Amino acid sequence: MYVKTLNGLSLNGAWQMQLRLYVSWIIGSATAFLFTGNSLLAYPSLLLTVHLVSVIAVVLYALSRQKDNFRLIPKINISLETFLLAFSMALALVVVKDAVDFILPLPQWQELSFTSVNTSSFYTIIVTVLLGAIMEEMLFRGIIMEALLHRYSGGIALLQSSLLYMLAHPDPSQMPGAFLLGLLCGFFYLRLRDLCSCFLIHLTNNAATAILITGGSLQFAITDPATYYTIVGCCVLVLVAGYFLLKRFTFHVKPHSYLSKENIRAKSVLFSEQ
């Protein structure tokens, strides 16, 4: 599954897409305040719903109002090797993210945290783990990163889309982990140009994070730090090994680089012929 683009996006266009997300947040928050009389932060489930609806609104805007530039291709394409690699790297990243959150002295805004919205009800679990993951990948990898790849190198598209994804998580304690997750999903998309592996990584990350939160991983880090950091080190090795394995699995796929005007014109012709 992927989103085909004819014209791509400039860096300014990618930020405009992010601003549409922020505007949707503001409109949703203002509407909720008018009906409840309280800040949206007092209602974790409603906060999560506003975020999900905002992402859906931006995705639908791109696919409908900008349909001359974006078109969804709903073709499932994932191999067994890719599935196993994405799943194992996603689990390893959860542990590494947990260690980063433990080491960095970042403040946590409990009202915006994954803990408060993910474990409060069955509804928030489904929305956070499943729907939110799918729609965020559609926006940040399927639309923004794909469109940036049409005009810029893979490195620029990867870093820019990961930065925007990080900024979509305003809790400071979540930002490093969100950036790392964006890099992992973006790397798979860069190598495969397909969203199926990105969906799998994001879903696995959210589900495993919920389990890790419930199990109290930080307490384990305090009571048995040697074992904890040994596990973290092993997970780092899994991520490094996975990086090279994915490059090996996709060695036959040419990197999607658009560094020159000639490449941009050639790709535009290719897309128009499909």
Image (spheres, rainbow, N blue to C red):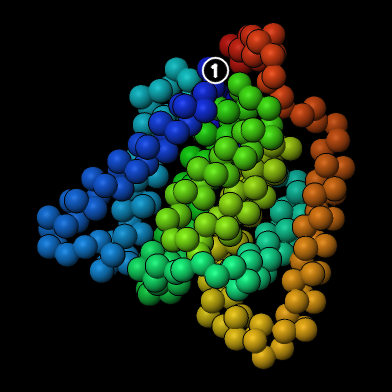
* Quarter occupied by the C terminus: top right
Q: Quadrant of residue 32?
A: bottom left
- Residue behind mark 1: 6
* Quarter occupied by the N terminus: top right
Q: Is residue 83 above or below residue 39?
A: above
- Under mark 1, the amino acid is Leu
Residue drawn at (61%, 61%) of the image? 204
Counting every numbered tag in the picture gives 1
Residue drawn at (43%, 22%) of the image? 67
Residue 81 appears anywhere in the view:
no
Which percent across, then down, holds residue 96? 68, 66
Residue drawn at (84%, 55%) of the image? 241
Q: Is residue 5 above or below residue 189?
A: above
Residue ranking furthest to the bottom: 223
> 117 or 60: nearer the eye?
117
Element under disc 1: loop
Residue 206 appears anywhere in the view:
yes
Q: Quadrant of residue 190?
A: top right
Q: Quadrant of residue 225?
A: bottom right
> 194 or 58: nearer the eye?
58
Image position of 33 (left or right of 77): left
Image position of 15 (left or right of 76): left
Which percent across, then down, holds residue 118? 44, 69
Crowd rating for badge 1 (residues with CA inside 10 Å; few <14, some 14–19, many 20+): some
Which percent across, then down, holds residue 84? 76, 57
Residue drawn at (55%, 55%) of the image? 178
Which percent across, then down, holds residue 170? 42, 56
